[in-house]
Image: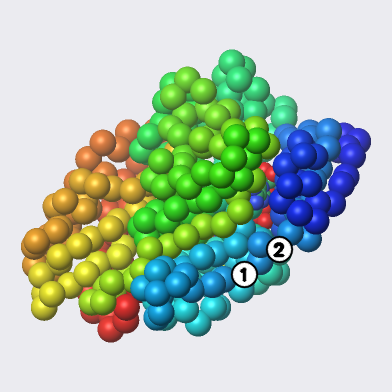
């Protein structure tokens, strides 16, 4: 681990002024500093910032939606009554992630910005275009069982590992930031970048920009949601494939559908194709399977991960079946 300077920020303004790497729960950052993957010269601890609240926005009964501070811990968010009841998919996604101890530390902002679990990225003995641009990608011809089948490029096939971000993608969340250029509200669907030829640039944040909070739109009545995660172990394991679905039903007709997939894409993967194939149709097994085929039609499996294509389809079908049967709102 390299030597670094440490500073605490008590206000957003002082955090921005410090111009360093933000430290939230530290469950990604400190790991990667110990591995010498990340070597910040200055670590700015943002734990004292007043950004740890979950609040209903004005409008009563969440009609204005929900505001989630960047420093809200994953366990607090998962167990918040408004989230459990109205945004079930988010609670389920959070509780499927990591372990209770990690969820007690991990924050909303840090979770969105966590780094890939690609073995080659995390091991400085190997080349990695994401860690060291232009050095190469050993995953493409190497051991790529956990890698992406959607959104990869000739430079990078690393998956984005977050469960929470997949649920937030299906909930159409907005990320709010403050940076040297002022405040911004960024739709989550526009937040993450595909690797292309610049895999080191993972999202649209500018250097020094701080996530202050995330907002979720008001839950619509008649909406049901579910997160299903498939992985090698039942606990304490990242997704090989996961599906987040938010469905508004009128009788058995699906009026509005939002779908995102995890574990298969280079970013949390929203599937407009699958959504379009379901909207206006009956909630039937046949239509769910067609949506799953649509979601994965552009999949480009690598040597060791072709199983992910069928696994993701099955995850999506099962998540849709469960959501369509569940009596809940979010
Ligand atoms: C063993 C293990 C298992 C795990 N399993 C899962 C899993 O199954 N599913 C899953 O989704 N995750 C899993 N995780 C990842 C975990 O969820 C993340 O490490 C965590 O959410 C990161 O949040 P943090 O607050 O600790 O971030 P930090 O480590 O503090 O920060 C992460 C990154 O975000 C930046 N950052 C933090 N806050 C802000 C902010 N407000 N504004 C701008 N930049 C910011 C930091 O500079 C850093 O680059 C696992 C982690 C471990 C160690």
Applied colour scheme: rainbow
Crowd rating for badge 2 (residues with CA inside 10 Å; few <14, some 14–19, many 20+): some
Residue drawn at x 30%, y 38% is 299
Residue 169, percent from left and from top: 40, 54
Q: Which residue is mark 2?
A: 50
Residue drawn at x 61%, y 73% is 76
Q: Is residue 324 left or right of residue 179?
A: left
Secondary structure of the residue carrying numbered label 1: loop
Residue 64, percent from left and from top: 40, 69
Total marks shown come to: 2
Vertical order, 250 against 299 (above or below): below
266 or 182: which is nearer to us?
Answer: 182
Q: Which residue is mark 1?
A: 53
Vertical order, 308 against 149 (above or below): below
The quarter holding residue 68 reads: bottom right
Vertical order, 55 against 205 (above or below): below
Q: Is residue 276 left or right of residue 261?
A: left
Secondary structure of the residue carrying numbered label 2: loop
- Quarter of the image where the N terminus is located: top right
Residue 39, percent from left and from top: 79, 33
The quarter holding residue 86 reads: bottom left
């Amino acid at each position: 681990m390299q030597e670094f300077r440490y500073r605490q920020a008590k206000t957003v303004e002082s955090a921005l002024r410090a111009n360093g790497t933000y430290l939230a729960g530290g469950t990604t950052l400190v790991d990667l500093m110990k591995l010498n993957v990340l070597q910040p010269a200055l670590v700015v601890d943002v734990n004292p910032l007043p950004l740890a609240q979950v609040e209903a926005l004005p409008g009563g009964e969440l009609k204005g939606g929900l505001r989630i501070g960047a420093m809200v811990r994953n366990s607090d968010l998962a167990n918040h009554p408004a989230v459990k009841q109205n945004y079930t998919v988010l609670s389920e996604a959070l509780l499927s992630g990591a372990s209770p101890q990690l969820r007690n530390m991990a924050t909303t902002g840090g979770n969105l910005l966590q780094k890939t679990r690609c073995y080659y990225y995390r091991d400085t003995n190997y080349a990695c275009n994401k860690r060291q641009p232009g050095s190469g990608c050993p995953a493409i011809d190497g051991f790529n069982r956990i890698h992406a089948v959607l959104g990869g490029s000739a430079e990078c096939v690393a998956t984005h590992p977050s469960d929470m971000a997949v649920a937030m993608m299906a909930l159409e969340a907005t990320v709010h930031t403050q940076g040297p250029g002022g405040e911004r509200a960024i739709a989550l669907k526009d937040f993450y970048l595909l690797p292309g030829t610049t895999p080191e640039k993972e999202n649209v944040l500018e250097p020094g920009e701080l996530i202050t909070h995330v907002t979720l739109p008001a839950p619509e009545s008649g909406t049901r949601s579910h997160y299903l995660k498939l992985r090698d172990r039942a606990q304490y394991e990242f997704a090989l494939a996961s599906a987040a679905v938010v469905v508004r039903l009128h009788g058995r007709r699906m009026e509005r559908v939002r779908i995102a997939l995890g574990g298969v894409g280079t970013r949390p993967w929203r599937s407009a194709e699958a959504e379009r194939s379901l909207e206006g149709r009956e909630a039937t097994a046949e239509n769910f399977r067609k949506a799953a085929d649509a979601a994965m039609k552009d999949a480009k499996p690598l040597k060791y991960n072709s199983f992910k294509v069928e696994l993701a389809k099955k995850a999506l079908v099962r998540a849709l079946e469960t959501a369509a049967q569940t009596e809940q709102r979010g």
